[in-house]
Amino acid sequence: MIIYAEALRTISIVILIFSSSFYLRHLVKTKKQRKLSAFEFTMYTTIQIAYLFFAISLLISIFGK
């Protein structure tokens, strides 16, 4: 049962990464065309910080063993 939960967690993480990367690409294109609104700028910054935290946690999990 734990294996299924871990598989679902992994699938959800992959889906979140892909969807946030597509939204980030959309925000970058929008930023080139016009100034971002307050909400769009907040999402732009939050996604970039989340990618940084994810990369750091991945490195810690790989090299921390």
Image (cartoon, grey):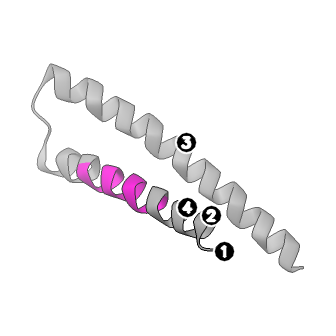
Q: Quadrant of the C terminus?
A: bottom right
Determine which residue is flagged by label 4. Answer: 58
Q: Earlier in the sequence, mark 2 or mark 3?
A: 3
Give whichever of 65, 29 is nearer the camera.
Answer: 65
Residue 49 magenta-highlighted? yes
Determine which residue is flagged by label 2. Answer: 62
Front: mark 4 or 2: 2
Decide: few, some or many residues near mark 4? Use Cα within 10 Å; few <14, some 14-19, many ≥20. few
Q: Residue at point 32% right, 49% down?
A: 48
Give whichever of 48, 12 is nearer the camera.
Answer: 48
* Residue at the outermost top position: 33
Q: Earlier in the sequence, mark 1 or mark 3?
A: 3
Q: Which residues are magenta?
A: 45-54
Residue 52 magenta-highlighted? yes
Looking at numbered disc 3 in the image, what kind of residue is underneath it?
Phe
Alpha-carbon span between mark 3 and mark 4: 16 Å
